[in-house]
Amino acid sequence: MRKHSNIRTRGALVLIVIFGILLHSCEELQFGNDFLEKEPSVDVTADTIFTSLELSERYLWGGYSTLPYGLNTNWSAKGNKLGMDILESMSDLCQSYLAWGGINELYYTGQYSAAVENSSPKTKYHFLQEQSWEGIRIGWNFIENAARIPDGSQSYIDQLKAEAKMIIALHYTDMFRHYGGLPWVDHAYAPTEETNMPRMTARATVDSIVALIDEAIPDLLWEVDDPSNWDGRFTAAGAMGLKARVLLFAASPLFNDDAPYLDGTAAAQNMTWYGGYDATLWNDAMEASKDLLDMVESMGGYGLVNTGNPRQDFQDAYYRRGNGEILISTRVRYQSPGWWNAEYYFYQSAGNYGTACPTKEYIDMFGMADGTPIDAPGSGWDAADPWANRDVRLYETALVNGDVYQGRTAELWIGGRERQNANFKGTASGFGLRKFLLERNNASAIGSVVHWPYLRLAEIYLSYAEAANEVNGGPTAEAYAAVDRVRSRAGLNDLEAGLSQEEFREAVLQERALEFGYEEVRWFDIIRWKREDLFTQNLHGVNTTDNGDGTFTYEVFELPPRYWQGNWSPKWYLSAFPPDEINKNYGLVQNPGWE
Amino acid sequence: MIILFGSILATMAQEYSLTGTITDATGEPLPGVTVLEKGSVSGTITDGNGMYTINVAPGDVLVFSFVGMETREIEVTNQRVLDLEMVSTMQDLEEVQVVAYGQQKKVSITGAITSVKSDELLKSPNASVANSLAGKVTGLSTVQFSGQPGADDPSIFVRGVASLSEERSQPLMIVDGVERSFMQLDPNEIESISVLKDASATAVYGVRGANGVIIVNTKRGEQGAARISASFSSGIQQPTRLLDFTDSYTYAQRYNEAQVNDNPELTPEQLRFTPEALEAFRTGSDPLIYPDTDWMDYILKPSAMQYKGNVNISGGTEKVKYFVSIGYLNQDGLFKTFDSQYDYNFSHKRYNYRTNLDIQVTKTTKIGITSGGRVGITNQPNTKDGMNFLFRNIYWSVPFSGPGLVDDRYVLSSDYYIPDNKKDGLDPFYGLGYSNILNNNLDFDIDIDQRLDVITPGLKFRAKVSYNTDYRHAKVRNSSVAHYEPYYLPDVNPEADSTDRTIVYRKIGSDGNLGYGENYGKGRNYYMEAGLSYAREFGAHNLGGLLLYNQRKVYYPSQFREIPTGLVGLVGRITYDYNTKYLADFNIGYNGSENFAQEQRFGVFPAFSAGWILSEESFMDALPFIEYLKIRGSYGWVGNDKIGGNRFLYLPDSYNPSSGGYNFGIDSPTNRTIAREGQIGNPDVTWETAKKQNLGIDLKVARGRLGVNFDLFRENRDDILTFRGTVPGIVAYDLPAVNIGEVENKGYEAELRWNDRVGAGARYWINLNISHARNEIIYMDEVPQNEDYLYRTGHPVSQPFGYIFDYFYSEGDAADTEIPDHQYDLKPGDMVYQDLNDDGVINQDDQMAIGYPVYPEYTFGANMGFVVGDFEFSMSWAGASNTSRMLDETYRVAFGATLNRSLLQYMADGRWTPETADQATYPRMTLTGKENNSKDSDFWLRDASYLRLKNLEIAYNFSGSFLQRLGISKMQAFLNGYNLLTFDTLDIADPESRTGSNSAYPLTKIYNLGVKVNF
């Protein structure tokens, strides 16, 4: 009996010890509610961020990361806009052969409709996936909290706030160019807030953007301090350039005319135009450009890349960071990671899948090496050797047969190394892309430092010339000088004197096409000038055949048709809002033609 | 004559030896039955085989009696053999049912619970035991999407879906009282699997119980001599169905046809496939330059082996009982490895081990030690775009992309002869090396059960501590391989004779060595509970109770890995019955979840249930054929705290101080770190609540041979955690979770069981069941839609939407102005859709609910079998209906999204042409019409109902004295199979598989042969 109880005691003791060990091993023994409390960890809240200059800056850099990049880069919602196509292929300058890209699926086939904007990531500007509204939220959130940042001089805090304003202004500028008037988000919304944000008129939208830029300019540095480390931040010059860009767009006939480009509710409410022609808009655009050009003259620090080597200068002007010509530069990474890398997809999509094959129409715009148009009498153009002795920008923009390429000559004939067969997508129009791809090798593009030249000083010269031509009813000497400044960098002669207003306008538009191909300028140029003629014309490519005796035969062929060539409607000028957003009833009104 | 008569009379009066076998209703022999001559004390009891022998005289009355069985009196006439089937009196009174945190007598259950025993699971040779449940348990549906070795666990639903997404409707899985997955346990380790369906069964799980609970108990030892059971089997796996792609010639023809359809002006030279290429494909004259490879056939073996083995020992004394099991599974994959230097084929080896001990420490104290684990070793190829895209990439390959391996060379045809990018079937994995992944799980529990009769009789203290770890180690061996492009000699060497057809190769890339990399993963969690239980009879009153505290901590969760997740709860239960006739249960769970703020953190989840066993009432005596009839009902509240993997939903705002970077500067490679705002918190979030009702009937008639169960349920799930859909996108914050969703789910389950015996040693059984669950979204915050039929609300969760296919456009229709504007120039053979809102345009607003979600609304099971002598036969059919699959990607678009991918045979055969317009089952071949013809529509939404022979087993039990000499109590050889037959209308792919971008490893059927020996 005694022994028995002994066993029992011992058994119980063993149990207690086992349980004790088990329980003890659970680091901190807690029960009930205490057990559920979030263990101490480093909670980072708004208080943490905005009570440190470094963390606040990090938050602002997040705003920079929302800025647009004109090339398709990766499979993120933002990086594959247009389904890995580029905006340029919507214009007359080039053709996309990317069968599964947004341009072929939605635009060339005419399958684009407002409903597509609800879900498809393949439209030219996606209202919600472009990160514009995220950028705007970051901007306002930063501005609202900036007063809490404890260290840093007041001027530096003001500069950061001004940069935040520019992030907002840049996103609005881009959206304005795709949609017209927009709802104005003027602070960072809290989930509990009412969200009634009616779409504003085109005028109010432009005024709001310009006001924001004007607020920012005085607080921004003229040039970036320590550009080696900080190039890419907003400067006063960049802000003035953006203002010039948005005002020129606003002054153009798309919005500034006697009638809206298309009737509809949004037009009736002046969301897609100014409600009438207003000559002062052209003046505002001219003044904005002039202000910047004058500042450049007086302050220095900026100028066109012009070392007397036109071809290299032109390449450096758009490709090289920190070249003094870039006013706004955006980034997705430091170096391109390689040709077949899905983190810089443009190489594949353009080089192999043909997102950006130049059209013959584009090639023909480039004049001779001295700038004479190829069809001008005495230009020296030789139909048997059509790509010789042309504007150097042609060779830096398109890959044409016979040009110097990878230490040899480019073979664009069918069966040649750049076009192994007629169906090879990368050069399916008979021309390849050179811009941004350079020589498609390690020596030039692959692994090089990359960026997106969102806005270059050269554009401001041409914008000034264009606006001055409209303000004065014809080209002035200053307007000529501005255009010639851009032409001379490319080694071209001055523009022909004595042009009429229309001729000069056309010459400037062409100059912009030649200078800014693949830089997201052309699309906006042809829509703001309502160039139905350029949308409806048939586009062409050239098949080159090697005759085997050093000569070539050229056969012009029609490129695959685009839906709007035969079914034109001005509705294509602006994008549709996603119907789901309109149905949320916070004040969006659909653009004309997409209701 | 008289003498004869007299002798008969004499015989009648004489005693003789009568024998017989006593069985229970299921035909199992009953040992220990008392056989008495009425009015005497002489008698016998049946032996281990239910046999008895007794000396009787005609006219004697024999009394057969056995605990729990109806006592039978039978008068002896002059038979020599008297077999008897005994019927249970108290309706399996002793049979127990696993319930939450314990067991209850089956008769007193008032909730909706269905169980499966181990032997049912052992009949299936498949690797994931969850797949064996299909068709066997009412209210439970499984969908097996993949047959990949080591990754073939199905999706499981208990009573369908009741939250706003399928992921959030997954049931809670409990193994031996602790939350753990049971799917990769060895079925030999499993005692029973119970599915808890209604609120009364799951309320005690509170905030986790809303989606149903699956409780698995592992086997434990029983008192007696050591029993050893060993089994081994080997089987062959074969794909149930492989996609059927066209050969090169058909592909090329159809591609050219598409080009001409799109642009009739094209000349043959302008087509992608030249006349030479077509001719070469047709004749197969040039297999290197113009290859024709059936990639599925080329890279996959027709079958792969699998082996299973298990040895387990159980037994015990009064003090110590043990169950020890070691199991082994080896599944080979279907990939050919050719002459590769290393093995990249899929394979999965699984070693399951378990030791369960029960120790009676003192008269009143029991300790249970439950330790089990498994080691899994998975081998798999390295792939280009990750395992999830392996099969998608293989399916994208085209037949003319290369001949495969020729003379040890990996040959890919060049773009020179057949233009455009093309991928071959080897490309996604061949030469890329392999990965070998070790998974090690170890679960360890200690239970204490202390009787406290000292305080009051029937009171017990119980406690449990469980500690579980898992560890993962992957060895990644990367490699690369060179490929060769074949050319005709003159095409690379202009000097050569232009008619020379000699093949020369150009080598591209290089053969890499096997690299080495590794990565690790780990996890651990602990669980503890302590509480009191009570069970006592007071005359006819039976009272039971349970009060328990538990908590669980999981380390290294997927989100905020550094902060463990916690769960705390109190469990209460009171059970009462009067005379086992009137039953009532009250269950309550009181839980807290870390996802919610202090004020919202704890919730009470009560459930009431009651039952009435009518067959115990005297008025039922009028219906003597009804042996057992119970009606039961329950009502209760259960919760769900899941919303994806998000945690701490209540914290007001959070920022990530280092999330990505931005590259400022000109030549500064270092990115500046970015800080981002996280999800906005909602301090008011709380759990979603399920209000569940259940009404059930259990019936047994015809002397227990026919059993019927019927359950009717309804669930209203409120406060479902979801996101608002109507917040303007332009506010651009990461939306907070809110409790606003509402779903109603209702349905029924019915089960019919019949078993009977025919003569001695032969019996058969059949079980038919059907389960139905249909849910409907009552509320979700939806964007206002232009048409009523566009709303998701009012439809089941994950309801597919799409256009309605009308007819194929044909030439004559051109003049018809009734055709709505498709915003695309329709060509003959293109799909015409119905203009649902009659606005003349086909757009987003013309989509409506079509078909059913991927989880079935109806599941069926038919399980049947018989035993004749030494033969056993059983089979199990499982079916599903009201389930759909949307054909997508490879399955839908000819030549794929990029127009250079594969073409399925059904598209090539069924395509529209002017000649076949009437019987076309696929639109015209086209490249430009892809967008119009491949919209989500009812044309692509296919019925995925199926009926399949999930399982079949034929077994033979050896008998003979040699067995006894070897000490063998049972020896069985068996042949069984899995997924043997499938009847469905999907045809193109397996009806359970996914038919979109996330194509997985094919489902397999298994033929398996084995032996089982018990000592």
Image (tube, coloured by chain):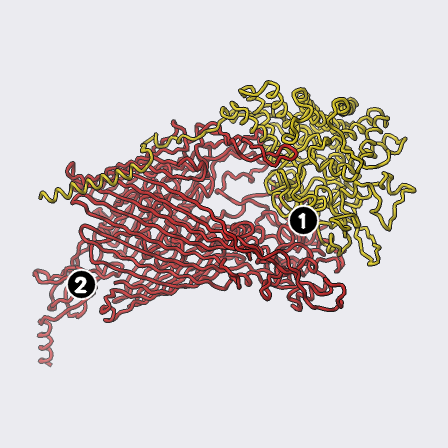
Chain colours: A yellow, B red
Q: Residue at x 68, y 55 (%)?
A: B420
Residue that mark 2 sits on: B47
Q: In the depicted view, which residue is nearer to us: B604 or B844?
A: B604
Q: Residue at x 80, y 41 (%)?
A: A392
Tag shown at residue A99: 1
Vertical comparison of B154 with A451: above or below: below
Vertical comparison of A299 with B448: above or below: above
Residue B820 in sight? no
Q: Residue A368: x and y, percent?
A: 85, 41
Q: Residue at x 26, y 69 (%)?
A: B959
The subunit carrying tag 2 is B
Q: Is residue B450 left or right of residue B610?
A: left
The subunit carrying tag 1 is A
Q: Residue A381: x and y, percent?
A: 88, 45
Q: Which image quarter is the C terminus of chain B in?
A: bottom left
* Residue lying at the far top of the rendered structure: A154
Q: In the depicted view, which residue is nearer to us: B126 or A511?
A: A511
Question: Which of the two discs, 2 and 1, sits closer to the camera?
Answer: 1
Q: Amino acid at mark 2?
A: Asp
Determine the secondary structure under disc 1.
Answer: loop
Q: Is residue A343 left or right of residue A566?
A: left
Q: In the depicted view, which residue is nearer to us: A350 or B252?
A: A350
Determine the secondary structure under disc 2.
Answer: loop
Q: Residue at x 47, y 27 (%)?
A: B652
Q: Residue B317: x and y, percent?
A: 19, 53
Q: Which image quarter is the N terminus of chain B in?
A: bottom left
Vertical comparison of A447 with B504: above or below: above
Q: Amino acid at mark 1?
A: Ala
